[in-house]
Amino acid sequence: MVCSIQGSGFRGSRTGYGKCKRRDSTKQSAFHDMKVISLASSLLTLEKRLLPHPTLEDLVCILNKCRLARNPGYAKRLYVYMHENGLETHPSLGNTLFLMLIDVGITHYAHHVFDQLVYRNERSWNTLISSYVEIGTPEHAFIIYEKMTKDQSVSPNGHTFVALLKACIELKYVEKALEIHAEVARIGILETDPFVASTLIDMYVKCGFLAKAHQTLCKLQIRNVVSWTMIIAGYVDNGHSEKALECYQQMQRDCVSPDAIAFVFALKACSSIRALNKGQEIHVEIERKGGKLGKDLLVSNALIDMYVKCGSIVFACEVFDKLPVRDVFSWTAVISGYVENGQGKEALENYQHMLEDNVCADGVTFIWVLKACGNVPDAEKGHYIHADIERRGFLENDVMIGNALIDMYAKCGLHYVVQHVFDQLPI
């Protein structure tokens, strides 16, 4: 037994689905192969009225096919068909149509369907709120949320609050976030939903309320590595590396094992305050964990950068030499270390090895190798690098590279070239 639409052709009919009835075997549905026929054929069958009474199963199937196709043209045609036949208000079909339109990206059509729904489930409310955040109009998310709170048939859940907190991040709505914080704490979601807790902490961090973020984390009964890393990263990015390392230690006292991202930010904190001893402790811990973590390029690059900035080029090179794969950041970190250590010749040798390794220099690399050329001095090598810079268009867009070129030529005593480079710099 399958449910069928009632009414004469049901054009403009708002009666929806009636009782179930068996299809006449002599009048096989044009949708009997719905799962194999194309979406275009299915839509054409609807629009040409080849099937006077499509079933609920038929329409759900075509809605899902349209949702997977992500084709706005097909989605609009299906919307028009269902709107003309009064199907957008159906409790099941209306919500499915709404979700399809959201997935395809036709939010304004979706909102119209949402307004017509007689019954709106929690998923529909949450999807509409999330969609406004995702398309860059987070202020509308709060308008929908206010309407949702007046619908006694549904209740906001973790998905609702995660979307609203993301909207707070976009809009820097700290006061609104405080209200949400109070609400999730009141109904107990904060302790049971790690996604709500981590998003709340992320919001406080990104809005610059690091102490509030840290306080929120400490009140949680369960604290995971994601939340701890957010706090550590926030302190590092805001110039509070000592506090970041305190949090790193507190995380370990909580018996939370650092992951790759946590290690990277802890090493950045060490780099910032030249905490070599702490950096070496973290290095030992990474080595002890071994496995994939010991070979993670981001972690290895952070180690190299930490040793370079702490003045330990030997240790930086030891890490570098063990890398199975090196990217431009790895090479640039070592080159910069040699330059800072007064070893311009070694810096240029590594630059040559980088090119032989088929790794292209970026703007930062060029600045450091130009400094090496000036310190050696090596005008010939500098001229060669200058030609490569011009060929790749860096001089037109990066004033810092232009300044590094001027400094290099000046140190090499080629003052007439200095004027030429200066004249080429963008105003």
Image: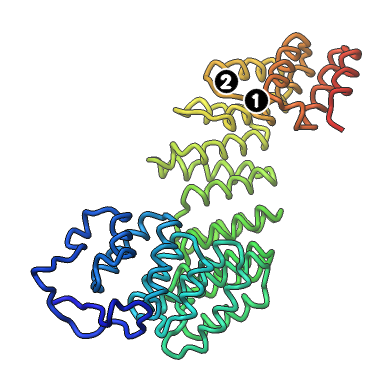
- Whether tag 2 and tag 1 are in contact, CB under 8 A, the answer is yes
Asked whether 76 or 275 is in front, the reply is 76
Asked whether 386 or 141 is in front, the reply is 141
- SS state under label 1: helix
Counting from the top left corner in percent of width and height, residue 14 is at: 36, 84
Q: Earlier in the sequence, mark 2 or mark 1?
A: 1
Q: Determine whether, in the image, residue 375 is placed left or right of residue 135.
A: right
Q: Quadrant of the C terminus?
A: top right
Residue pointed to by mark 1: 335
Q: Badge 2: few (under 14), some or many (20 or more) residues near its Cα, within 10 Å?
A: many
Which image quadrant for residue 76?
Answer: bottom left
Counting from the top left corner in percent of width and height, residue 186 is at: 51, 86
Q: Could you tell me the amino acid type at mark 1? A: Ile
Q: Residue 279, relative to residue 321: is it above or below?
A: below
Q: Residue 76, relative to residue 155: is it above or below?
A: above
Q: Residue 280, relative to residue 421: is it above or below?
A: below
Asked whether 297 or 415 is in front, the reply is 415
Q: Badge 1: few (under 14), some or many (20 or more) residues near its Cα, within 10 Å?
A: many
- SS state under label 2: helix
Which image quadrant for residue 385?
Answer: top right
Residue pointed to by mark 2: 354
How many numbered circles are shown? 2
Counting from the top left corner in percent of width and height, residue 143 is at: 59, 78
- Determine the residue positioned at 29% across, 76% down: 9
Q: Determine whether, in the image, residue 33 is placed left or right of residue 358.
A: left
Q: Determine whether, in the image, residue 262 is placed left or right of residue 421.
A: left
Report if residue 315 is visible in the image. Answer: no
